[in-house]
Image: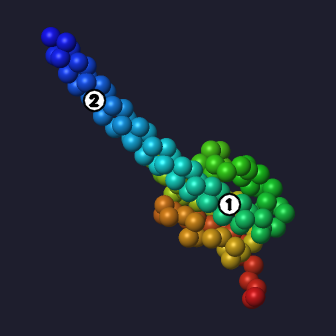
Amino acid sequence: MAFKILFCSLVVLLVFLLHFATFASSTTSSVTATAEVGKAFYKEAEALLNWKASLDNQSKSLLSSWVGDRPCINWVGITCDELELGVSRLNLSSFGLKGTLYNLNFSSFPNLHTLSFTKLALWNYSR
């Protein structure tokens, strides 16, 4: 009888340990995925802020909502995809910004599919 109780206790303990190991593994994967999304947002925000810094002062003031490292939260002209994996649209067509696209690092936006600068006054200069 004592052997049956010991055996059942060991089986329950083994099942618990396997369940805990599976939970810990899935939690680690979730944390890793969240960290990767965070890095992507930071990279996009950094690229947008660097580009904003290259614009003239009036244009910078028009983009005053561009602060912090979360472009999908209240940054004018920015739209993110439904899963919030990154910036999907950049629509600055009505702002009348003045500057160049030279300092906009397009490779920082893997989810960007729409870019609109209808009234962008581009400066032409050679480096």
Q: Residue at x 67, y 51 (%)?
A: 69
Depth order, front residue of 112/114: 112
The numbered mark at residue 14 is: 2
Query: Which residue ends up furthest to the top in the rendered image?
Result: 1
Label 1 residue SS: helix
Depth order, front residue of 75/37: 37
The amino acid beneath tag 2 is: Leu
Query: Which residue ends up furthest to the right in the rendered image?
Result: 57
Query: What distance separates the C-alpha of mark 2 from that of mark 1?
Result: 48 Å
Q: Is residue 124 visible?
A: yes
Residue 125: horizontal and vertical position, in percent? 76, 85
- Is 98 placed left or right of 23 in the picture? right
- Is 63 placed left or right of 70 in the picture? right
Report which quarter residue 106 is drawn in. Answer: bottom right
Vertical side of 19 occupied by 83: above or below: below
Residue 30: horizontal and vertical position, in percent? 44, 43
Report which quarter residue 45 is drawn in. Answer: bottom right
The amino acid beneath tag 1 is: Glu
Q: Residue at x 17, y 17 (%)?
A: 3
Q: Quadrant of the C terminus?
A: bottom right
The numbered mark at residue 46 is: 1
Residue 82: horizontal and vertical position, in percent? 46, 47
